[in-house]
């Protein structure tokens, strides 16, 4: 691990395996999603607006080569430690096309002289054996290949609630097939999705530890303007069904105490986090994670213009890293120490 961190950051994966720091350059190749084009549904998942999750330089009206050039110039200013680059196909589902089309798109990125490989953001229901076999061949011929699966939750009730369009079993199958081929993979999860209790969020670590993933990304739920979830969240506020994590934990404890006499106590529909609560939550969560996992991110950043509120202010990810490190140091926690 990096000497100053108490968890295993994803930058370590690149330095350990490739001997240098690799910076992701976001590419928008114009893909869509089966949850948008009518195959599974329309409108996407209830929380989703892809415009909120990728930089301005990556737009599908530009060639892939131009996006990479502009992205590298952007990162040279922002991240001085970057030594080499990897194309990150991020917006929407980047395996949602016939294999012949995928080969054509990925080849454009891999032909760039400054690109060493590709990171492919996709859904677990958008891969098949043919695509995974080809990606395995690509990785075995010296190209860096990483698949980033949007899993979001380990609970089927949550996946159904957010209109995800697949269940957790589908995610497990994709992860296992990818691992069987030796392809590096990252799983993305969201904390605070509607209907999940504090105990369920805490307990999900046990299920995640059983997955053959290489790396993990964790985000707190952020309510994006114009999404269906923004309407759900407003309704929950009006009905008094939004609680902070601390309030939710107290409510769950109260319900457990009164269960013997069958007294009903309403659970919140949404659990939000104050900044201090989230840092404490994620510190203890990481302490229960397998120590071999690499952690790509533990919190999300969305530009303020996209969110209906910024409860943590305009704090940047680097500041959150410092806060997490201090909290883990205070609690004397390291990744995996509480398993």
Image (cartoon, rainbow, N blue to C red):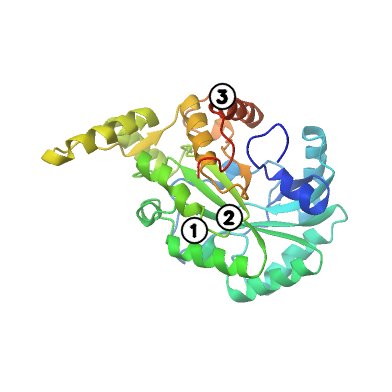
Q: Residue at x 67, y 74 (%)?
A: 133
Badge 2 local density, few (<14 within 10 Å), some, or many (20+)?
Answer: many
Q: Relative to 291, does residue 96 appear above or below in the rendering?
A: below
Labelled pair 2, 1 in contact (Cβ < 8 Å)? yes
SS class, disc 1: loop
Read off the residue under disc 3.
Answer: 330
Check disc 1 and report the residue beneath it: 36
Q: Nearer the viewer, residue 137 or 49?
A: 137
Q: Residue 110 shows which numbered tag?
A: none
Alpha carbon of mark 3 to alpha carbon of mark 1: how far?
45 Å
Q: 155 or 253, which lies in front? A: 253
* Nearest to the observer: residue 196 or residue 309: 196
Left/right placement of residue 141 relative to residue 269 reads right
Tell which circle, 2 or 3, labels the residue nearer the N-terminal end: 2
Spot occupied by residue 246 in the image (x, y as percentages of width and height):
37, 28
Q: Residue furthest right?
A: 113
**Residue that badge 2 annotates:** 92
């Amino acid at each position: 691990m990096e000497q100053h961190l108490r968890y295993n950051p994803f930058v370590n994966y690149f330095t350990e395996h490739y001997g240098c720091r690799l910076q992701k350059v976001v590419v928008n190749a114009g893909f869509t999603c089966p949850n948008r084009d009518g195959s599974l549904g329309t409108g996407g998942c209830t929380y989703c607006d892809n415009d909120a999750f990728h930089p301005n330089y990556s737009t599908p009206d530009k060639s892939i080569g131009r996006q990479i050039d502009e992205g590298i110039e952007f990162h040279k200013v922002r991240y001085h430690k970057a030594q080499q680059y990897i194309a990150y196909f991020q917006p929407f589902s980047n395996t949602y096309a016939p294999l012949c089309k995928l080969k054509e798109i990925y080849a454009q990125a891999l032909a760039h002289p400054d690109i060493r490989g590709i990171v492919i953001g996709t859904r677990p229901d958008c891969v098949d054996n043919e695509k995974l076999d080809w990606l395995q061949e690509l990785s075995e011929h010296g190209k860096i290949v990483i698949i980033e699966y949007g899993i979001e939750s380990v609970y089927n009730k949550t996946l159904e609630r957010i209109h995800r369009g697949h269940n957790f079993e589908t995610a497990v199958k994709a992860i296992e097939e990818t691992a069987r081929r030796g392809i590096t993979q990252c799983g993305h999860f969201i904390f605070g999705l509607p209907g999940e209790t504090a105990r369920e969020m805490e307990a999900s670590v046990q299920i995640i530890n059983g997955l053959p993933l290489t790396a993990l990304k964790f985000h707190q739920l952020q309510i994006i303007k114009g999404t269906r979830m923004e309407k759900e969240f407003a309704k929950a506020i009006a009905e008094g069904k939004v609680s902070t994590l601390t309030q939710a934990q107290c409510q769950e404890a109260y319900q457990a105490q009164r269960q013997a006499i069958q007294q009903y106590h309403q659970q919140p529909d949404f659990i939000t986090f104050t900044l201090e609560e989230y840092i404490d939550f994620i510190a203890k969560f990481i302490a229960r994670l397998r120590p071999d996992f690499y952690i790509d991110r533990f919190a999300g950043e969305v530009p303020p213009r996209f969110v209906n509120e910024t409860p943590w202010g305009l704090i940047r990810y680097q500041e959150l890293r410092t806060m997490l490190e201090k909290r883990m140091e205070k609690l004397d926690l390291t990744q995996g120490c509480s398993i």
